[in-house]
Amino acid sequence: MIPIASPDIATHAQDDVESVLESGMLADGAEVRAFEDEFADFCETTHGIATSNGTTAIEATLRAFGIGEGDRVLTTPFSFVATANTIRLTGAEPVFADIDPETYTLDPEAAADVAAEMDVDAILTVHLYGLPSEMDALVDLAAELDVPLIEDAAQAHGAAADGRRVGSIGDAACFSFYPTKNMTTGEGGMVTTARDDVASAIRSFINHGRRADGGGYEHVRLGTNYRLTNIAAAIGRSQLDRLPDFNEQRRANARRLTAALRDVPDVTPPVEPDGTRHVYHQYTIRTEQRDELAAHLDEHGVGTGIYYPTPIHKQPAYEDVSCSAPVAEWVAAEVLSLPVHPGVDADDVDHIIETIQIYEN
């Protein structure tokens, strides 16, 4: 079976973890600080603040911008539910705008229409599947509304728009290091920002409200423990070193898949708009025969995934939310992700292509 995901942890990462274990400094510490600095440099921005996972990264960021009870955050309904859950965890409410039918990311025009109907206090866009959102238009919209623009970059480590890496475009960005992501720490997250005030507020919040320097038992605000461990950071530093190679292999696999599938009937491959750099956390096609094709691929040893079968506004937990998102609902009924990770070799790509072509013929 060719799996839909396959984390790759190098031997030297295991050695790094052993060094941390031998040091006895297992929790937050020097490895975390080094990982934060290196990841911020990679994203070409000023600050990196490591957190326990991608969800806590988003929640901490929203709180740093003062988002809370009575506020509204404009976002996409086509994402993992954590994007919206974090908004509600602050006491605010998600306001959904529809997605672009080609990129599946937040449609800036739909977002502007929603913002014209009601006040919003922040925009949280998602770089879905590894493709950046239409950032120029969203930056302009956020400036017009005078609200922060936050990037949910959980699936987009190393992606870029107009020569700028995600993580350095909005007011802040949030990453996940879950095992299936382009790089992993096992569980973990990161916030990147160029704003000193935001970085300071996040550092304090994730460390029980201590001063941003973490010193002593003086707690200057309400906070919690969303810290990353030195163990996870040691894995992350190794993974970050390998991320460019991981991404290049994903992109190479994606190019071969797209070249072969673009002429297959009832299969729409993903797009990479001019000026963007897609890092293919998922290689997601669209087909009206989604379930049948997935079963066929499974029978021939190819794993698949559906990300995501139900838009957030159709989830039971959000049944009280009023939302018009016909594009998101249509796309959710047709998306199917194929293996594209670095563990997929040339023979695997050939097998995936041939299996789809056999089905279609």
Image (spheres, rainbow, N blue to C red):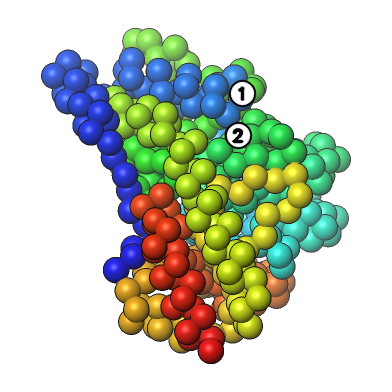
In the depicted view, which residue is nearer to us: 17 or 29?
A: 17
Q: Residue at x 52, y 32 (%)?
A: 191
Question: Residue 267, position in %: x, y?
Answer: 60, 77
Spatial CA distance of label 1 from label 2 is: 7 Å
Residue 322 in which image quadrant: bottom right
Residue 233 lies, with reference to residue 175, above or below; the image says: above
Residue 318 in which image quadrant: bottom right
Image quadrant where one finds the N terminus: bottom left
Numbered disc 1: secondary structure: loop
Q: Is residue 134 left or right of residue 285?
A: right
- Disc ID at residue 209: none
Question: Residue 184, position in %: x, y?
Answer: 37, 41
Q: Amino acid at mark 1?
A: Thr
In the depicted view, which residue is nearer to us: 198 or 35?
A: 35
Q: Residue beneath label 2, please?
A: 167
Query: Residue 24, can we see it?
Result: no
Closer to the chain start, of discs 1 and 2, is 1
Q: Residue at x 79, y 61 (%)?
A: 110
Residue 69 in which image quadrant: top right
Q: Residue beneath label 1, please?
A: 45
In the depicted view, which residue is nearer to us: 285 or 193?
A: 285
Tell whether label 2 touches label 1 (CB within 8 Å).
yes
Q: Amino acid at mark 2?
A: Gly
Question: Residue 173, position in %: x, y?
Answer: 59, 36
Q: Residue at x 58, y 29 (%)?
A: 43
Q: Is residue 163 left or right of residue 334?
A: right
Badge 2 crowding class, 10 Å Cα cut-off, few under 14, some 14 to 19, many 20 or more, is many
Q: Residue at x 67, y 60 (%)?
A: 271
